[in-house]
Image (tube, helix red, strand yellow):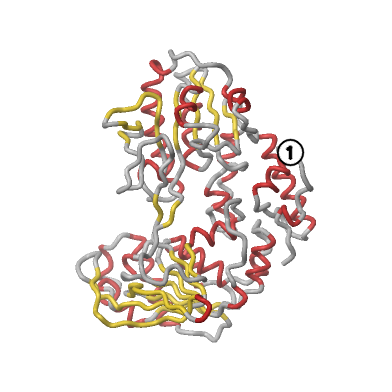
Amino acid sequence: MLRVAVVGSGPSGVYAAQGLVGQCEVPGVRVDVLDRLPTPYGLVRYGVAPDHEKIKSLQGNLRAVLEDDRVRFLGDVEVGGPRLSTGRLLELYHAVVYCVGAARDRPLGIPGEELAGVHSATEFVAWYSGHPDAAAGDFALARARSAVVVGAGNVAVDVVRLLARGAPELAPTDMPQQALGALAASGVRTVAMVARRGPSQARFTTKELRELGALPGVDALVDPAEAALDPAYAAGPDAAAELPAVARRNLEVLRGWALRGPGGARRRVVLRFYLRPVEVLGGPGGRVTGVRFERTVPDGPDAVTGTGVYEELEAQLVLRSVGYRGVPLPGLPFDPVTGTVPHAAGRVLRAGRASPGEYVAGWIKRGPTGVIGTNRPCAKETVSCLLQDAGALARRALPGDPLDALRAAGLRPVEWSGWLAVEAAEAELGRSLGRRSVKIPDRPGLLRAAGARPGPAPGTAAGGAAPG
């Protein structure tokens, strides 16, 4: 029997597990999928916007893998912590595949970034997604009138859309009640999404962009003069023919917005281009009041250069969305330049040599690139290498069922039955609030729901059912 641990239950981890148990030429494969959270699915549960139900439905595909008899989910297990080192984990399994993502956001690196009211998009997404590690609070939405989101990727579009949406549209989602209440009380009327480059270099998809233009009660605007700075935009549709298809379609959408102009809606979403943030501005009490930008101009195919001309945008809330980086896992080698674990086709490298039994997949392997589907071929490559090594790996004797060793170390893993209990508790919480299933946003509440900890029933204030 080949026993493998997969660390991380997001798409890359589950795709790795699927690839392992799907190999009939290696009989007797058993896979334990470990996660530091009590819940499975990773960024599909905690990173996909709650109003994107079609993408969130991918949970059904991941669920089918985790319910396979040869796969075991073990949540609330932190690898690299005091109770379970990476070295000890490798003693318990023939092989370990690390799929731990890229959890750290990139800072802007400008003065004033420490002011109250300046946050990463990662923090905001974690909050409205009910992530157990999310900071408590409401982002002072009730006092804000204008928000600035720095970045031009799909995450930036998500947070802009959630800030601009009305509460009635979000009520059918699984968003935690406290976050829903804070967004319902939001005073934000203008949301500016700002990019240092032009429309043809933006990294959002056309589907996401069109969603912004179709929000009820929201005007979606673009400054025609800024968009015209983009050589491809200014030259017209024919000149854009050589651009990638996504960029070409994005330009078509933005041209339509520029021609349409404002319609007098209560809220506005404004896309700004060729503006580079240089300073976050503050006022009394150390709170953000705005952002100073330098105007840029194109300088080659993908580069821009500053002009020395500055503009200030008012903001009581600033969210940065300029990329992610991997976080070192104690016991694993780490390249601080790339933010990844050194590897060769998924085999972890130590001092330039493949480390027997250690593998990586997902963002910690390749960096924060691609979409959810990109994780499938990435995991396939890693699994292929592991299976090539399987014969030698499986000859090593193991001490027994790893679950016994985890419990002996003081860990209390949440198994699949515990997760099903969480699902039932979240469905009941939703019914009690007149909504569909509603997420329990805190770890103690999740553990109580899973039956892993004693305490009040889910749905109390500790379980995230604060009125709002």
In the rendered image of this protein, does residue 145 appear above or below residue 376? Answer: below
Q: Quadrant of residue 33?
A: top right
Quadrant where the image shows the C terminus: bottom right
- Crowdedness near tag 1: few (<14), some (14–19) or many (≥20) residues, C-alpha within 10 Å: some
- Left or right of 368? Residue 66 is right
Q: Quadrant of residue 184?
A: bottom right
Which three-letter amino acid code belongs to the residue tagged 1? Gly
**For the point 30% across and 33% down, which residue is it?**
344
400 or 431: which is nearer to us? 400
Q: Position of residue 136 (x, y in %)?
A: 62, 60
Q: Position of residue 245 (x, y in %)?
A: 34, 60
Q: Position of residue 160 (x, y in %)?
A: 50, 69
265 or 82: which is nearer to us? 82
In the rendered image of this protein, does residue 218 appear above or below residue 47? Answer: below
In the rendered image of this protein, does residue 227 appear above or below residue 135? Answer: below
**For the point 53% across and 72% down, which residue is it?**
214
- Left or right of 196? Residue 147 is right
